[in-house]
Amino acid sequence: MPAARVDAVAPGSPADRAGVIVGDEVLAVNGEVVRDVIAYQIQVDGAHVELDLRRGGMERVVHVDKPDGAQLGIELSSAVFDRVRTCDNHCPFCFIHQLPKGMRKSLYLKDDDYRLSFLYGNFTTLTRFTEADLERVVSERLGPLYVSIHATDPDVRTRLLRNRRGATSLRWLELILDAGIEVHGQVVVCPGINDGAVLDDTLLGVLDRFPALTTLGVVPLGVSGHNREEEMRVHTLAEAQAVVDIVERWQARYASALGRRLVYVSDEYYLLAQRPFPPLAAYDECSQHENGIGMARTFEAEVRAALGGAEVVGTGPRSGFFAWVDGAPAEGYRAPREIAPRPIAPPEPVNGAERWNVIVTGELGAAVLESLLPELPGRVRLLPVKNGFFGGNIGVTGLLTGEDIAAALQGQPEHDRYLLPDVALSRGRFLDGTTAAVLPRTVEIVPTDGGSLVQALRRTAPIALVSS
């Protein structure tokens, strides 16, 4: 029987008043065995909740009374109480296959579970999807979902997934869309395999078979230094430019045929192609922000809005890669992880000069921030961190490790102030398992949005002149 372990109970919450404690195992809710947090949330929504618990090997029933729709105040150990549906594809571009040895065991888990797609925005290929899954998705309206398409040509998709079901599993996508479920798609472009004419054919196939997709993101593959697939390589400048050109042509075609752009290329492609980002309006609602699409222009708009006096609304830590495994909460649907505010000391003069605010970021983040430096308050400079842990072309801030950040901070002035985006951490730990406590300089963790950065910088005396 699947069971969810209680990891935390909010003091004074309905669950706390009813006697639920950390370590309890939830066996059933209202007499129903629940296999994931989706079913759990549906069952605990009412005013009276009956929990079948196991504590110290003994089973007991706890009754919880609360306002209708109020949360119980329990944080569970996982979003999925039964076994996570693991991925049986063998994609040559899979980042899990490119991880170095010695990391936390949970980070090597490959999932292809539609429930985690719904809860955390993970992309699923649907190769393990079933009739029963379709019935549940449709009856419970589990959307949005996120589906990896990669190619609509059956042979190409089979080659990319290294799974014969890759040729047919997109039939589930048609049925899900026909039922009116919101779905966002993704194409990971591998040079020489699904770019060029194949990408053109894929975008035509989307128009023909999946025009009800809400968005389609086109992103480059990440190639770590631990990649063992010879055919997986980084894009050349010309290849990146060609992908951008193809996507922009299809945006115009989709707009003409469907009245909306539908397809968007990631920010990283514009950096690879050495082209400016489109205006924010060109990303429409930025529905694939977490996939790195429209992130740069959104951040820029947040910074300028905050500088113009708009109220800063904290968004909490971005979900980021691997976040569901160790850091995303079981309570709620994509519930934000909260970070406790930290007091920030005022700047202290050092030999008559004010100290610098140093933004610690990945190499791609530095490329985005560079143009904003003259507008930021105070004396601000960047500290780009090269990702030596993963190597290759991995440059996003969310995949930085404590080891690489420590190397970058070593030798930096002690009196300067160091700001680190919270996207690099999950429950206080970097991907290599270390914490900020091991860093050679004190860092302040700042929410990963432009408004929060401006708010943090304004806690020091503003100075106009800024350089990198």
Image (tube, helix red, strand yellow):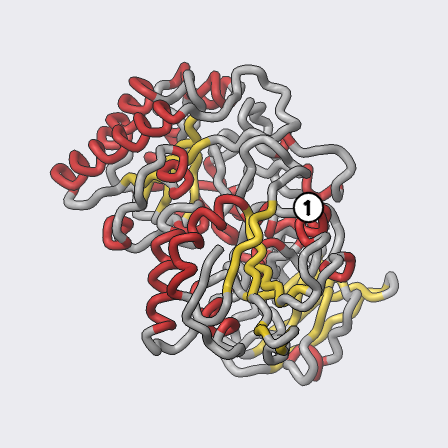
Please state the horizontal and vertical placement of residue 145, each as a whole percent of the image: 42, 46
Would you call the spot at circle 1 few (<14 residues within 10 Å), some (14-19), or many (20 or more)?
some
Q: Residue at x 30, y 47 (%)?
A: 180
Q: Which residue is drawn at 43% across and 31% down?
A: 188
Query: Is residue 180 visible in this depiction of the protein?
Result: yes
Q: Position of residue 106 (x, y in %)?
A: 71, 44
Quadrant hosting residue 33:
bottom right
Q: Where is residue 143 in the image (x, y as percent from the top left)?
A: 40, 51
Asked if residue 88 lies left or right of residue 197, the reply is: right
Q: What residue type is labelled 1?
A: Asp
Q: Could you say which is closer to the camera, residue 352 or residue 449?
A: 352
Q: Residue furthest front?
A: 351
Give left or right: position of 193 versus 232: left
**Image point (38%, 41%), residue name:** 266
On screen, residue 227 above or below 114: above
31 is higher (above) or lower (below) than 240: below
In the rendered image, residue 313, in percent from the top left (x then y), is placed at 43, 73
Q: Which residue is drawn at 53% across and 47% down?
A: 115
